[in-house]
Structure formats: structure tokens, C-alpha cells
Image (spheres, helix red, strand yellow):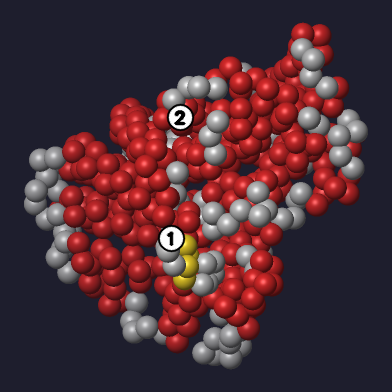
Amino acid sequence: MNQRVHIIAGPVAALVVALILRFFTLAPVEAQLMSAVVMIMAWWWMTEAVPLAVTSLLPMLLLPIFGIATAKDTARQYMDNILFLFIGGFILAFALEKWNLHKRIAYLILSKVGTKPSRILLGVMLTSFFISMWISNTATVMLLLAAVMALVSEMDVHLAQPEAKRKLGAGLLIGLAYSASIGGLATLVGTPTNMIFYREYQRAFPEANDMDFMHWVIIGFPVALLLLVTAYFTLRFMFCRGINTAVVDRFYFRDKLKSLGKWRREERIIAWVFLVTVVLWFTRSDLDLGSYTVPGWASAIFGEKSKYIEDSTVAILAAVVLFLIPASDKKQKLIEWKDAERLPFDIILLFGGGFALAYGFELSGLSAWVASGFSHLNGMSPVVLVFGLSVLICIISEFASNVASIQLMIPVLLAGYQELGVSALFLMVPATLSASLGFMLPVATAPNTIVFGTKRIRTAEMMRAGLVVDVAGVLIITLVAALVL
């Protein structure tokens, strides 16, 4: 269907769902109206009938009109503290890019791995994985794409067989995209889906102290590492098999690193700001070791008022510091507001729209009504539940934005976890991780789309590799959830 048809189909589907709930269920009137809001947003988000940010504005329009929430209360959902974690992280990423620190990191890693195809693939994937732990997967691919394309061109000179050139180039580009998506799983700031989960969990359980930057890494990093290993060996088998000779000059990466010159003052300061920020994120909360608790810096410094300090506070501290420190020429700061004007406000609206959707979901009584339906699944094996949930969200994320997928799923899981007899984390964490598993289709994620746009990758190649990584991802997430959560 074309875009115009999807624009019309969204409201029609919403009306049908609301009428079904009206005449065939005992759902409250507000829940019936909210179901229409959910349906039109789901349809438009998944089909991208209109820009995602435009769909995200619908709660601001429809919740007050339907009498579900006031305009003032709905508007509050669009500016949450988690958004400032996202903003601060992006400003830090802009500083890395502005002063070419990302290139230095990339060439440093690549210079250590060697010049054979499998080692170059490993270097590209490790570089992308590491950078995407701290900035968005889309930004990671955009930062590294030029360097990887230069590698592909260099290999064209050293490889005689045309098919070998093509396959190896495709493997490197797919590896860049996959590892950027995988790296985002490892930290809370790595991908917007993680931050959406974090906000909704904090809102639902304000007194809980079982989820912060450190707790997420304990779960997310093992999943990401296992998935990275799986993706690497899959791509190595598919694209590097039979090519054992060196495909770039042995000093290629070293020379690239040398071309950047000595570390400049700006690079050193940004590197320190980055490292200190990461340490502050890891050590903010108390670390419970069972018989002993290691106090975090927030409680050690601020005592009872440490609850006022969040990971977003640290992110904004880093951003403000970068705005204050002058560059060597004294004519500009390390980061200027003109640099920050590139902030993706469409994604910020996407966050807000999802938060408002979740707010209306609960306020309307739709969450309680949905939860009553989960009682039929009570008694099912928790592992089977997680596996089925991961498969479902993985399939959805192949066709829809991972952010949109998790925005729609989180309210449902918060509504039903008690009926299923499991903890909220046991469902929410696997769901969040699974939303980042879209590896098969070129449209599944922005990284996939970007590298596919180079026209060096065949759809069938991405689908075969992506199927293996998707299946492995579902199994790894299920396993880690069963062992850790």
C-alpha cells in the first residue's frame, strides 16, 4: 500500500478496534478510546505513513480531546529527565566527532588487528561495537562509514577476483552495521530503546534500586558480547572464507593513525571528560555485594539527597563542561551551540510521544484491562514466556522502528507482569534487548539502511546473515534472562 492509503488505514483500524472493545468487551470507555490512540500510532509508526515524530505528537492532541488526560499533564511526558541523558550523550558524541577523536580510536584499534580479511572484519566490528556503546548506532555508522569505504576501496586494489572483492566489501559493511546495533545493547546510553525502558521502569517503580547504569551493564554487556562473537563468526564464514592473503598494506592503518598527528589538547581533554563521565555513570549508585555494600559517590557526597542525582545529571555535567572549556585558539569552546543544533529533535519527540502513550495507557484503565487477559498465561514456564516475547518483538522490529516497537510493548508488559507471576524486569529487559535485533532486512534499522545504500550488499546476503544473528540473539537473551534476572 502507498503512503496515502496507510494514512487513511490508521484511523480506520483505530475505529474498528475501539468498536470491537465497545460492543464485545467490558473495557471502560476511556480504555476503548485509548485503544484507538494506540492503534493509530502503532499503524503509523510501523508503516511510517507520516514521519515518526509527527505520529509522536498524537497523544498531545488526542488524550485531551478524548478526556483521558489534561493537555498540561500530557505535555509533561514530553520532557523527562531521561531525555537529558540522551541529549548529554549526543553532545559528547558531537565533541568526539568535531575533534576527530573517533577516527583516532578507530585507526588505533584497526592498527592492532592485522591485514588479513578476518582480522580487518574483527577490527571494524570491535571499533563499531565500542563506539556504539556510548553513542547511537546511527551516529556510529555515519562516523565510521567513510573509513570503512576507504578500506573497501583499498582492498579493491589488492584482490584480483571481482567476486572476492565484492563479498569482502559487503561483509565489512554488514559487520559495521551489525556491530553498531549490537554495541548499543551493552549500556543504557547505547540506544534509545534502553533509555525508554529505564524511564518507564523508574516511573513504575520509583522506590526500586535494582536498575541503573551498572545494573544494566551487568545484563546487557554479556548479551552484547555473545551476540558480537556470533555475528563475527557468521560474517567471517560467509564473506572471508577462502581469502587468506593480506588485502591492505601492512602499514595502512598505522599510516592513517600517523596522519592524524600528535594528540591535540582538545582531544586529550575530551578523552578525559569521556572517561570521567563513564566512571561517574558506573559508580553513581551503591553496589550491593550481598554481605557488603560499596557506597556510590552520590550517596557518599550528597547523603540522603543522592536520590535527586540521576545518570542524566552526569550527562549534562559532561555537556556543560565541554561548553565551558576553550579550545587552543581561544576563539571557540570545545563544543559550541552551533554544533549542538544537530541534536535529533525528531527522536526527542519520539521519546516524548512514547512516554505520553504509556501515561495514557495507564490513566485510561487500558493497562488494567489488558492485564486481566494475561491471567490465561499464568502458569506458563517463565523461560518459554521470555522466548516467545523475544521472538515476537524481534519479528516486529524487522518491520518497524525499534523505538516504536518498545514504546508499544512496555505498557503492555507493565500491565501484565503480575498476572504472569514474574517480575517486571524479567519481561521488560528481554523485550528491550530484543527490540534491537532487527538484522535481516535493509529497512529494519538505520545502520542496515545506511550500509545497504552503498549498493555493495545484496538483500539475500543480509537476510541470510541476519537470520542467524536474530536467532542467536533470541536464544542468548532468553538464556541470560533465565540466569541473571
457 or 128, nearer to the observer: 128
- Counting from the top left corner in percent of width and height, residue 402 is at 54, 39
Between 159 and 88, the one nearer to me in the picture: 88
Disc 2: CA contacts within 10 A as few (<14), some (14-19) or many (>=20): some
State whether residue 80 appears in this view: yes
Front position in the image: 311 or 255: 311
Dot in front, 2 or 1: 1
Could you tell me which residue is drawn at 59 percent across and 73 percent down? Answer: 299
Image-based side of 249 in relation to 465, left or right: left
Three-letter amino acid code at the position of disc 2: Pro
* Residue for badge 1: 290
Q: Quadrant of the C terminus?
A: top left
Q: Based on the displayed image, in which of its 4 quarters is residue 371 positioned?
A: top right
Q: Quadrant of residue 345?
A: bottom right
| Amino acid type, label 1 | Gly
Tell whether 169 sits left or right of 223: left
Earlier sequence position, callout 2 versus callout 1:
1
What residue is at 90 percent from the left and 42 percent from the top? 70
Q: Is residue 298 above or below residue 242?
A: below
347 above or below 412?
A: below
Q: Residue 94, image x and y in percent?
A: 54, 67
Residue at the spot 79% in from the left edge and 19% down from the top edge: 27
Residue furthest to the front in view is 291
In the rendered view of the protein, which quadrant contains the N terminus?
A: top right
Read off the residue under disc 2.
382
- Residue 473 visible in rendering: no
